[in-house]
Amino acid sequence: MNRLAIGIDLGGTMIKAALVQRGEGLVVEKARDTEASHGPDHVLDRIAELIRSVADEAPDAVISGIGIGAPGAINWERTSVVQPPNLPGWGVVNLREALQARLGDELPVFVENDANLAGLGSAHYGRGRPYPSFIMVTLGTGVGGAIIYDRKIFRGTTGAAAEIGHMTINFAGDIDRYGIAGSIEAYLGQKYLSRYGRHKLLTRHESIIHRMAGKDLKNLTPLMLYEAACNGDEPAREILRWAGHKLGVVLGASINLLDIRKVVIGGGLSAAGDFIIEAARKSIREYVIPDHRDEIEIVRETLGNEAGMLGAAHLVFQSLDEEAVRSPA
């Protein structure tokens, strides 16, 4: 019998959901605006509505459960999200209980950090499939991370491992949103990279960014930098190479710590791969001890948002398999 699960990607702007067949991938995908400003109860109602809509696409099939990727910290039991960023009014919310109450059944619900699930999705459906173990980095509004070990998420002691975005590469550097000095997110998060690019390009009038970003470059975004770089704009390419060098620094430290030599880069900013990732490939070797330099690979995940939904669904399959082993009866 085909095994199906529903994977949810809960974001501050959009809620995305997919019906996933194990080993095959997406069957159907749907999305709704999050409407986060209306508070957690409203958002939870919208998630439940989306789950019902996706489940209706498989009327004759048994759905094994629901997996949810959420920003922020997740408790060890994988039931609750703790103060997720971009979701105002949320403190600690037990998503399992809230959704089971709304759906009126005991369908299993498993909650995990969204970057972890992007890594799990890559491990079983994307560019991470050839690698039993790898480091996942997601480049977007912030910088997320996951450690995939033996095709499973390494969670640490409380479930909060792999906060690569908050690893410091310069103790005297800029402060990130959690108050950590010189973290990689303080260089590569969208807000920070845009600010750096603006300062560097204000006097570089040969750059086409001045025609794209408005007066004083106040509307500059990483996407503009990428588009300009693709059009041959050397100042924009310099900034993306600068970002890639910083990425290589933090990845080198991660490889030294973990002895995991494969890296998968995902998230919206990963689209600038030819500029950022190639620069990271060059710089990483400067920051890795000689014994760890062999077999280093950095690849770009091309699944986009699908990786998180696929990972969320696979978390259901994996968790139920583990429960069956523990309680075979």
Image (cartoon, helix red, strand yellow):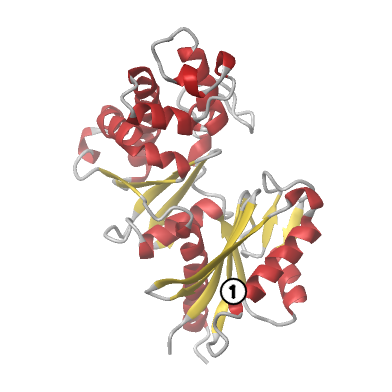
**Residue at figure coordinates x 31%, y 24% from the top left:** 232
Task: Tell me if residue 128 comes above or below residue 231 in the rendering.
Answer: below
On the question of residue 151 being in view, the answer is: yes
Q: Is residue 288 left or right of residue 49?
A: left
Type of amino acid at the residue the image marks with label 1:
Val
Question: Which quarter of the rendered picture does the N terminus lie within?
Answer: bottom left
Q: Position of residue 75 (x, y in %)?
A: 64, 58
Q: Position of residue 8 (x, y in %)?
A: 58, 64
Where, by quadrant of the figure, is residue 274 drawn? Answer: top left
Q: Position of residue 132 (x, y in %)?
A: 31, 60
Where, by quadrant of the figure, is residue 192 drawn? Answer: top right
Task: Tell me if residue 324 comes above or below residue 95 in the rendering.
Answer: below
**Residue at figure coordinates x 64%, y 33% from the top left:** 178
Q: Please, what secondary structure does the residue beneath circle 1 have?
A: helix
Task: Tell me if residue 161 comes above or below residue 168 in the rendering.
Answer: below
Residue farthest along the left direction in this orientation: 294
Q: Is residue 232 left or right of residue 270?
A: left
The answer to which of 193 and 30 lies nearer the viewer is 30
The answer to which of 170 and 222 lies nearer the viewer is 222
Residue farthest along the front direction in this orientation: 211
On the question of residue 184 being in view, the answer is: no
Where, by quadrant of the figure, is residue 235 drawn? Answer: top left
**Residue at figure coordinates x 47%, y 43% from the top left:** 268
Q: Is residue 39 left or right of residue 108?
A: right
Q: How many marks?
A: 1
Is disc 1 surrounded by few (<14), some (14 to 19) or many (20+) residues within 10 Å? many
Which residue matches tag 1? 54
Q: Position of residue 253 (x, y in %)?
A: 37, 34
**Residue at figure coordinates x 27%, y 27% from the top left:** 286
